Amino acid sequence: MTFANTPDGLIETDAVIVGAGPVGLFQVFELGLLEIKAHVIDSLAYPGGQPVELYPDKPIYDIPAIPVCTGQELVDRLLSQIKPFGASFHLGQEVTSVQQQADGRFFVATSKGTRFLTKTLFIAAGVGAFQPRKLNVEGLDRFEDTQLFYRVRSPADFVGRHLVIIGGGDSALDWALNFAAEGPHRAASVILIHRRDGFQAAPANVAKMRELCERHEMQFIVGQTSGFEESDGRLTGLKVTSPDAVTRVVPLDALLVFFGLSPKLGPIADWGLDIERKQLVVDTEKFSTSVPGIFAVGDINTYPGKKKLILSGFHECALAAFGAAPFIFPDKKVTLQYTTSSTKLHKVLGVDSPVLD
């Protein structure tokens, strides 16, 4: 794999993938099996997308044949899996322009001046340029990334600290339980705040949270944030107003806010593709968008019955690769081969073919 961050001359290629999350990485693999080399672009400075950016240490349980792995572990395994295919990565840059040329190829330009001329384009941009929804309290933003956090990059940073966590979804409950439970990441105290006594989270986690509260191992407060207190330039307390209009000050060392993500398609909205509710409309035969030669896989796309799962994105990558083959090899019949038995694929993967008795 090649990681590039600097602009260079026009790169002519068969495939460009926009997005280096798990689905974008697996798209490299499926294209590689068809002997199609890809260039990968991502706005982040490293591969991994949402799992690495938002929950690198959070366990994932629904990857086939892997009972449990973290977001970072999943990405590391995918990077290892695609290593034989020599994909080139262009990180820390956003695609700013996509223009179809007279010969059917696509001119793609990035915010750092990297330019491509590609036969096919794969959009694996997740929910787009996602941004955490912020806590709207005037002046609180001064503490962002010092005491106010919208994501957990390193759980070890919060060990032994007095934490206030705001939110009612899976992320808020997951991290509250993580920091409240016995273990290497235990905080000095955990107070969970939500605007109502109801959650959009896994029922088992809600039950576990209430159990920990009953054992006085964490607290749960119903209320809205109405202000904060500081001393010597440090955030010391959060003002929380309950439904009966009583305001109390909750002391803290660090504030974690999980209001979900606000997806922004950004420049993708201007590429002339059919869009429905900020998602790209695709078919389910080859996951092509409304523009032939441009494919969309993962959370960025929509179709009847769509489920936003990494597993679903992996399936979409396989069909998209075969859908792209006629654009890249117009005079070649591409057939399905199996990695277990194909000596050709073994050569592509750089593995020895088994000797059969």
Image (cartoon, grey):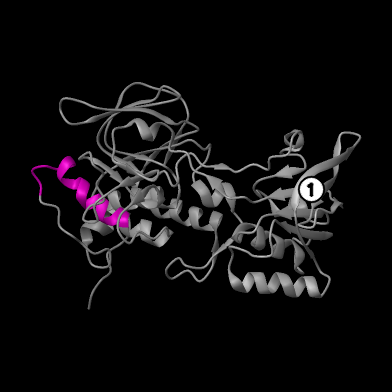
Report if residue 48 is visible in the image: no
Looking at the rendered image, the quarter that the N terminus falls into is top left
Residue 122 in picture, x, y percent from top left: 31, 42
Q: Amino acid at mark 1?
A: Ala
The magenta-colored residue range is 316-332
**Which sits in the foreground, 7 or 263?**
263
User: How many dots with numbers?
Assistant: 1
**Left or right of 84 in this view: 259:** right
Quick one: label 1, few (<14), some, or many (20+) residues within 10 Å?
A: many
Residue 170 in picture, x, y percent from top left: 60, 61
Residue name at image x 45 percent, y 24 percent: 112
**Which sits in the foreground, 248 or 128?**
248
Q: Reply above or below: 241 against 173.
A: above
Residue 78 in picture, x, y percent from top left: 44, 54
Q: Reply above or below: 73 against 35.
A: below
Q: Which residue is mark 1?
A: 254
